[in-house]
Amino acid sequence: MDVRLDDSLNDFRDEVRTWLEEHLSGEFGAYRGKGLTGHEDIPAEVQIAWEKELATGGWLGIDFPALIGGRECTLAEQVVFHLTYVEAKAPGRIPNMGVTLLGPTLMAFGSEAQQQRFVPKILSGDELWCQGYSEPDAGSDLSNVKTRADLVDGQWVVNGQKVWTSLAQFADWIFVVARTEPGSERHAGLSYLLMPMDQPGIEIRPIVQITGGTEFNETFFSDAVCDENMVVGGVGNGWKVAMGTLAFERGASTLGQQVSFRQEFEDLLALAKVNGRWDDPVVRQELTEAHIRLEILKYNQLRMLTALTHDGVPGAEASIGKLYWAGWHRRMGELAMLVAGPEGMVAGADCHNGHGDGPDYPLDKLQRTFLYTRAHTIYGGSNQVQRNVLGERVLGLPREPRP
């Protein structure tokens, strides 16, 4: 993909930059450069408010059609937006499942009524969504879903449990993969349901992470309900729709992610030169290798974006990118502790976020990065799953034996 800026893209970049400078003031301005890895240095309520602020400029729907309230930006413009956003050190974005996952899914598989009902409120920031995929026995193997939904008097009655439902405690709606055909197994008999969260049949239990935050949750359904027409893509087609959702997970924002990683690396490099760790040949070699791998990461992301320009859907390049960036950032967390030295093992009182949602002990940015990045190689498709995808779908190797 050619990311060189012509006059039109330069004008668009200036528009983004100007808007951010005007709106990153007051309360929001205080959170520049925060809310990145782990998110916990910004209260979730502030991040949600920032999403609504972005919506006033039309920035939530940059890749959505204009007829539904989006900006209908080209892929090049989307890349420029994400790059400019990160370069401005704007606050880290909350995982907005409506914008990144459900909205595109509805545009691809939803009925016109579903699109008109939900997409405008997603793009205005008025309705926040969470994802009901994983279960205790259905994480990477999503086809093992046991949550069931029965059609009773024009409503789907849902019973079961989901886990790792990010920000469920703040969400207005949840999209749920449930088994709607009794006795079905594996990919068959699943449906993709849209459910309101504000109802008696849903219980949310926060999961305390190693960093002390509670982004993730367990979500329990006990006779929770949604209307019969809240099925996306038709009854029994849940697997196809769910896989379509995952295909939208990695797109134009990935190059912005690489720039964010570069900012982290440059900060760490500066610290190493200030505290003298740069003089240690082992540390210096590790930092050099991290720089080289970061350049490789950039070209991996460009390759994925090139695939998007050809057919609009990321292919195996997305699995290569996820596998590579997850490993790089996890090693970056380990390198942060190496650069910090013995001080990295001690929490400092001046590091506490002060919002009451952190751990009993304070963490600084490097410590939080080290702890949070341990999960990178698990969530969003574990490294083992990504290697299986590449082995089976790209290299043509035999499928992994099933028990």
Image: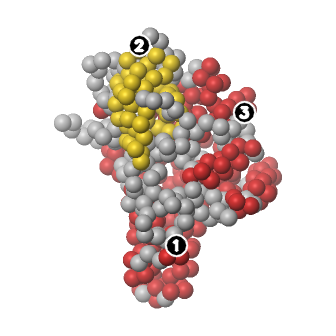
Q: Nearer the viewer, mark 3 or mark 2?
A: 2
Q: Nearer the viewer, mark 1 or mark 3?
A: 1
Q: Residue 396's x, y, as percent?
A: 32, 40
Crowding at mark 1 (Cα within 10 Å: few <14, some 14-19, many 20+): few
Which residue: 39% across, 31% down? 221
SS for tag 2?
Answer: strand
Q: Earlier in the sequence, mark 3 or mark 2?
A: 3
Q: Which quadrant of the view contains residue 110?
A: top right
Which residue: 21% across, 36% down? 402
Q: Which residue is mark 3?
A: 69
Q: Which residue is mark 1?
A: 351
Per the model, the C-alpha gap separating discs 3 and 2 is: 35 Å
Q: Which quadrant of the view contains residue 286?
A: bottom left
Q: Which residue is mark 2?
A: 152
Residue 316 falls left or right of residue 76: left
Q: Earlier in the sequence, mark 1 or mark 2?
A: 2
Instruction: Tell me the kind of residue under disc 3.
Output: Gly
**In this picture, is 44 found above or below 292?**
above
Instruction: Tell me the kind of residue under disc 2.
Output: Val
Which residue: 63% across, 58% down? 91
Per the model, the C-alpha gap separating discs 1 and 3 is: 41 Å
Per the model, the C-alpha gap separating discs 1 and 2 is: 53 Å
SS for tag 3?
Answer: loop
Which residue: 30% across, 18% down? 182
**In this picture, is 40 found above or below 207?**
below
Q: Earlier in the sequence, mark 1 or mark 3?
A: 3
